[in-house]
Image: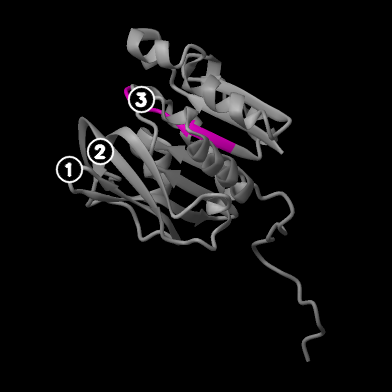
Amino acid sequence: MKIVVWNENRHENENPEVSAIYPEGIHGAIANFLGEEFEHVKTATLDEPEHGLTDEVLKETDVLVWWGHMAHDEVKDEIVEKVKQRVLEGMGLIVLHSGHFSKIFKTLMGTTCDLKWREADEKERLWVVDPTHPITEGIGEFIELEKEEMYGEHFDIPTPDELVFVSWFEGGEVFRSGATFKRGRGKIFYFRPGHETYPTYYNKDIQKVIRNGVKWAANTNTPTPVYGNAQPLEEIK
């Protein structure tokens, strides 16, 4: 399996608080723990040529992990279209935290993907609502984060194919924080936690969920449909 972790890498370069938490960037932190289980893990960032997502890179990628926040508009539309086509062809996509507002996620969802938010250092409890789902393997009934940014309903997404996690926040809001979708042959997992000023991606349960999500989203052995005018398989009498 070949995995690419994409990150706009702007907070890390502009905010000393973020660079202190993630000295190798959020993408580096995620790639490091994924690399403990998977052999082929690369990173790509916004300011690289073609955002690091060249045709060659995308063609070889089985699962793309996406983190973005302050520079969604800087992602080129032609790169978004290429990523979309790869998802439709079967590439898995893991969208993290503020990636809900990324061009690629909004394009694949077809909605605004808007929500309520608040930064108040509040507790988040992510409840497992589908304990049979492979993404929850090895996780208890819930994951508790001491401090996180609040995301609250209504979350303007299509009804998920599967709802895996629901979050409760100290301030009272709830949020569909783990949801899966299928687009074409590709599988998509949106996972909410991961605000840049908190060390969320060092949490072992969060890491486990992302590793599980990558394995779930990988799609290497399914048949490729053939479209268009078709010759009959049997003799038509």
Q: Label 2 near label 1: C-beta < 8 Å?
A: yes
Going 22% across and 42% down the picture, which residue do you hit? Answer: 170
Please, what is the three-letter code of the amino acid marked with disc 2? Answer: Met
What stretch of residues is rendered in magenta?
64-70
Earlier-in-chain disc, 2 versus 3: 2
Q: Mark 1: few, some, or many residues within 10 Å (few <14, many ≥20)?
A: few
Q: Which mark is residue 210?
A: none
Q: Please state which of residues 184 and 146 is positioned toward the viewer in this rendering.
A: 146
Going 57% across and 36% down the picture, which residue do you hit? Answer: 64
Identity of the residue furthest to the bottom in this view? 237
Q: Nearer the viewer, mark 1 or mark 2?
A: 1
**Quarter of the view holding residue 100:** top left
Going 36% across and 61% down the picture, which residue do you hit? Answer: 159
Pointer 2: what residue? Answer: 150
Whole-angstrom CA distance, mark 1 to mark 2, is 8 Å
Whole-angstrom CA distance, mark 3 to mark 1, is 18 Å
Whole-angstrom CA distance, mark 2 to mark 3, is 12 Å
**Res 78 seen here:** no
Q: Position of residue 43 (x, y in %)?
A: 58, 22
Earlier-in-chain disc, 1 versus 2: 2
Which element is circle 3 on? loop
Q: Please state which of residues 55 and 70 is positioned toward the viewer in this rendering.
A: 70
Pointer 1: what residue? Answer: 171
Direction from residue 53 to residue 124 in the image, left or right: left
Q: Position of residue 187 (x, y in %)?
A: 55, 51
